[in-house]
Amino acid sequence: MTRIKEAGKAGVAAYTLTEFAFWLGSVPLAIALVAYTTGSLPDFATTEGKEAVAGYVFVFINFARVIVPLRIALALALDCFACLHGTQRALQPLRRCTARRF
């Protein structure tokens, strides 16, 4: 996270976009995969359904935690793109991007 902070506003913007895209895409995909593999969605009214949902959530959250470094790396890779196409135009239209490349 320190590298994202060092990248400035463009780094924060890139990290925000990557996190938004990850959560917006992964949650519906996880629900669709559960429905596809089991044939139906778990029933929240029964104890078995609640236990199944707890298991799915446990696996999904741990997977999301494991790939945090990949999401940060993607945000750092998109840092210059966000600087050139987003924050530079919106905040400082005449200054040149000073994002660091690693």
Image: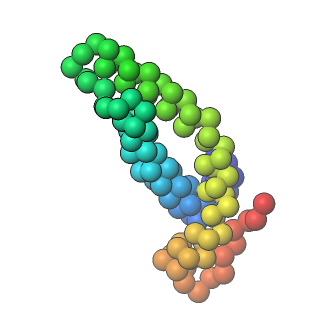
Q: Residue furthest top?
A: 47
- 29 and 57: which one is in front? 29
- 95 and 51: which one is in front? 51
Q: Is residue 52 left or right of residue 67?
A: left
Q: How is the image coloured?
A: rainbow
Q: x and y percent of residue 10 in the render?
A: 58, 65
Relative to 55, does residue 62 appear above or below in the rendering? Answer: below
The residue lying at 56 percent from left, 76 percent from top is: 85
- 100 and 22: which one is in front? 22
Q: Residue furthest front?
A: 39
Which quarter of the picture shows residue 44? top left
Q: x and y percent of residue 73 in the render?
A: 67, 52
The residue lying at 53 percent from left, 72 percent from top is: 87
The residue lying at 32 percent from left, 19 percent from top is: 50
Q: How many marks?
A: 0
Which quarter of the picture shows residue 45? top left
- Residue 23 visible at all: no
The residue lying at 31 percent from left, 20 percent from top is: 49
Relative to 7, does residue 62 appear above or below in the rendering? Answer: above
Relative to 15, does residue 51 appear above or below in the rendering? Answer: above
Q: Is residue 22 left or right of residue 77?
A: left
Q: x and y percent of residue 86 in the render?
A: 52, 73
Q: Is residue 19 left or right of residue 94?
A: left
Q: x and y percent of residue 69 in the render?
A: 66, 43
Q: Residue furthest bottom?
A: 94
Q: Quadrant of the C terminus?
A: bottom right
Q: Is residue 80 left or right of residue 26?
A: right
